[in-house]
Amino acid sequence: MELIPVPRRLANKKYNKVLIVFDWIGWIEPWMFWSVGVILFALAAISAEVSVLPWIALSTFAVGIADYLGFSINLQLFVFSLSLLCFIFVSRRVLKSDLKGLDAGITEAVSDMAGKTVIIRSLDESSGRGIATGKTGREWNVLIEKGSSVSVGQSCRVKRIEGINLVVEGD
């Protein structure tokens, strides 16, 4: 194995080891990068890991493309680093923006419902109790505020919470 000539002041064992790693990266063919990407995607799917591993796999694909296009080893490392940071940054923003449509994300807790709007699905007018659904479709036990008139299908605002019951008043 032939190493790249280095200036005398930099010729030490540690620097030569770095050069050996660069030479090793240079021997990797584009199809090898793509194979590693597929393996990493498979591992991410098997382990249900979605925070970093799929983005490392995509970055590995990007390095394979850079290698196929003839980029230098330094540029391949730069492509990997930049693409990984971009994928992680963009994925976080996309995932967070998807959750903004639902006020409480996937689940709603009873404490999250104060001041929110629910739709009455069933109602027992004699007891002032009923069932309503929130934005996520979860059903809630509701108590109708005294003096408020509410009907089935009506949208109501949650005034307060009593235990596991939402106290609602008609809009």
Image: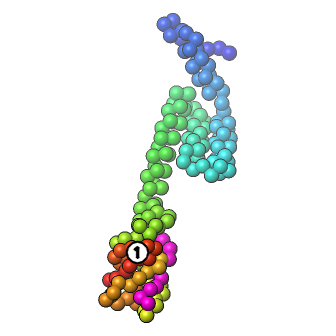
Quadrant assignment, res 73: top right
Residue type, numbered disc 1: Glu
Q: Is residue 44 magenta?
A: no
**Label 1: which secondary element:** strand
Identify the residue at horizontal 46%, vertical 63% (top origin).
Answer: 105
Residue 152 in view in this figure: no
Of all residues shown, which one is farthest toward the front?
163
Of all residues shown, which one is farthest toward the bottom?
126
Disc 1: CA contacts within 10 A as few (<14), some (14-19) or many (>=20): few
Residue 58 in the image: above or below residue 166: above
Identify the residue at horizontal 58%, vertical 11% (top origin).
Answer: 13
> Quick check: 44 left or right of 125?
right
Q: Which residues are magenta?
A: 127-139
Residue 154 in view in this figure: yes
Residue in front for this viewpoint, 72 or 168: 168
Residue 64 in the image: above or below residue 156: above
